[in-house]
Amino acid sequence: MGRRPCCTKEGLNRGAWSAREDNILINYVKAHGEGKWRDVPERAGLKRCGKSCRLRWLNYLRPDIKRGNISVEEEELIIRLHKLLGNRWSLIAGRIPGRTDNEIKNYWNTHLSRRIMQDGYKILQDSYNKQLITDDDEGSRSEFIQGTGQETHDDHSVVRTKEMRCSNAFIPKQLDIEMEKNASTLVIPDWGSDQIRSSLAQQEDNSDENFLMDYVVNDLLMSDHKLSCLDSHQDKELNECENMVDGEMDHHAKNNYIMPSCCEDFLVSGHDQAMRENWRPQTEPNSQPNDALDLKTLTSLLNLEDEWIIS
DNA sequence: AATACGTTCAACCGCTACTCG
DNA sequence: ACGAGTAGCGGTTGAACGTAT
């Protein structure tokens, strides 16, 4: 028995959506919420494939989607994130408030890829220099941003995709010490072990000391530094990091991954305490450490990274 | 004004990861 | 453990629009 097709494709509308179809879908999602996309066309009375409904909602109709041109800041962010993450559009989109993966992918393919082909990532350096100048003068900085026609602040939430929801790594301090001892191997903890349980219990009363990390961000922050700051065993750990992000670790390992100490060192011993504070998580294990980050914060963090690259 | 060519971006397609029974 | 169903991802397509000739 084969898989049931997502739709019969017979008698269905294709191509651009009409305003009427949009309204129907918006009203349906308002009333019933997202999900069960296969059932949406029938229940909402749309002659569309469920997949098409989902795409239309996620990429166009969602209320938190930001319309309009990509700002200079956003463009810079896209370039930096692409440099570090490659064509993982949903990951990139997950860190740019109000933008969808499709939009960023299109923008990259039409605007940025050619520039990168011509100039390489040199444009990042130019952009960085420009920012250094404007940072010296807050007034001129705001002018710079206003000059783009974009608001300097917005309240759009991040368009969250599946990959944004994935694992946080929780690093008890004691475990990190253990990792220091075993630096030549990647430590995948057994979360049921007595040692881990006791370590976790010890730190429950001291939640400020806990340090949740989003492995994607770790990857983002450390990838260009491995040559300059790591010795060979640390490099091995980094490879494991990258393999994990590339999906070469199994699911269990992904969910339980502990960032190698060298990676955390970069976060902790980075430029200043503010950087660490920026990444300090909420104390809830299921919370998402980056929710509070706005575009400026992320941009400034990436600038810190550039300082490392440039120096 | 007509046509060709280039660009943009919404939508589609095929695949994979994940979930659930 | 397995298989079917679902959600989501990234690559690709093609219609609409803009610009050059």
Image: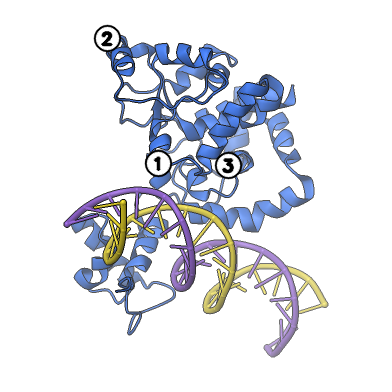
Chain colours: A blue, B purple, C yellow
Query: Which residue is nearer to you in this view: A148 or A210?
Result: A210
- In the picture, residue A140 is in which quadrant? top right
Foreground pick, A217 / A109: A217
* Image x and y of residue A155, in percent: 39, 38
Q: CA distance from mark 1 to mark 2?
A: 30 Å
Circle 1 Cα neighbour tier, 10 Å, few/some/many (<14 / 14–19 / ≥20): few
Q: Are marks 3 and 1 on the same chain?
A: yes
Residue A205, numbered circle: 2
Q: Nearer the viewer, mark 3 or mark 1?
A: 1
In this rendering, would A199 be left or right of A218? left
Label 1: state its secondary structure.
helix
Dividing the picture into quadrants, the one containing residue A72 is top right
- Give the distance between the C-alpha atoms of the residues marked 2 and 3, in whole angstroms: 36 Å
Type of amino acid at the residue the image marks with label 3: Leu
Asked if residue A150 lies left or right of residue A235, the reply is left
Residue type at numbered disc 1: His
Marks 3 and 1, Cα distance to the nearest angstrom? 20 Å
Label 1 chain ID: A
Q: Secondary structure at mark 2?
A: loop
Q: Compared to A274, does A79 lie above or below?
A: below
Helix, strand or loop at disc 3?
helix
Residue on which disc 3 sits: A85
Mark 1 and mark 2 on one chain: yes
Sequence-first tag of 2 and 3 = 3
Sequence-wise first label, 1 or 2: 2
**Subunit of mark 3?**
A
Check disc 1 and report the residue beneath it.
Answer: A251
